[in-house]
Amino acid sequence: MVPEGQRDGLADTIKYTYLNQTVWDITDMLNIVIGQGQNSYTPIQMNRAIATITNGGYLNKFTLINKIKNHDSGEVLFENVPENERIDIKDKKHLEDIKYGTLLVAKKNVLLSQLPIDIGIKTGTAEVEGKNPDGTDYDTFAWMVGFAPYDKPEIAISIVLTQGDTSYNASPIMRDIVARYFDLNVEMINAQPTAEDIQELGESTSGEDQQ
């Protein structure tokens, strides 16, 4: 018990307050399932996650270097050899089920459904506390991760728009990246979701809270 007029020390606060909340229980699982809770991930982490889910469960080692060449001779001094490890999962079918869900989301996206190849995406909006210089609250951050093509993925893409509002706003970026990578002749239009689209697609267009 803390004497009147005094405050808990930092060690006591951590030991008796925060650590008591670190026990994992079913409520944490339910929170994760719907994308809520105090999550904090970088675009690279999300990119590796969607790549692992869609490549059959292989977690690739991240690197920024493909190869290093001698400036004068062009000799290849170093060439990266991809490294990965299989994640521990009991039934690979679970990954296929998740992958199929990403296909359905992409097909219901007003913009991405126009692509001539099938892709998979997952959307999300992250709530961030804080205020802008003008005093207004921060808007939600728009997230979208995806991969293409659906059957034999070659690339994984992660997009985050700071204060981007609904995750649907990341759709043109996803479309243009896929189109450029696969040299697709896609008309660069900015189709806007209708009220019917928002009602049917939910978070894909309207930005329901998810992280």
Image (cartoon, rainbow, N blue to C red):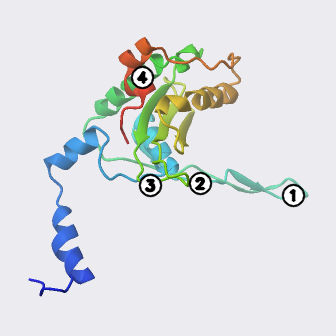
Q: Could you give the CA–CA distance between mark 1 and mark 3, rounded to whole angstroms?
A: 47 Å
Q: Could you give the CA–CA distance between mark 4 and mark 2, rounded to whole angstroms?
A: 29 Å
Going by the numbered disc 2, the residue's amino acid type is Thr
Secondary structure beneath dot 4 equals helix
Q: Nearer the viewer, mark 3 or mark 4?
A: 3
Residue at which label 4 appears: 105
Is residue 116 visible in the rendered image? The answer is yes
In the picture provided, is 52 more to the left or to the right than 66? left
Q: Nearer the viewer, mark 4 or mark 1?
A: 4
Going by the numbered disc 4, the residue's amino acid type is Val
Between disc 4 and disc 2, whose residue precedes?
A: 2
Q: Could you give the CA–CA distance between mark 3 and mark 4, rounded to whole angstroms?
A: 31 Å
Between disc 2 and disc 1, whose residue precedes?
A: 2
Q: Quadrant of the N terminus?
A: bottom left
Q: Nearer the viewer, mark 3 or mark 2?
A: 3
Q: Quadrant of the C terminus?
A: top left
- Residue 56 coordinates in the image, percent (x, y): 41, 35
Q: Could you give the CA–CA distance between mark 4 and mark 1, rounded to whole angstroms?
A: 45 Å
In the picture, the disc for residue 71 is 1
For the point 27% across and 81% down, the residue is 10
Q: Nearer the viewer, mark 2 or mark 1?
A: 2
- Residue 170 coordinates in the image, percent (x, y): 55, 32
In the picture, the disc for residue 21 is none
Residue at which label 2 appears: 63
Residue located farthest toward the front when viewing the structure as drawn: 135
Between disc 3 and disc 2, whose residue precedes?
A: 2
Going by the numbered disc 1, the residue's amino acid type is His
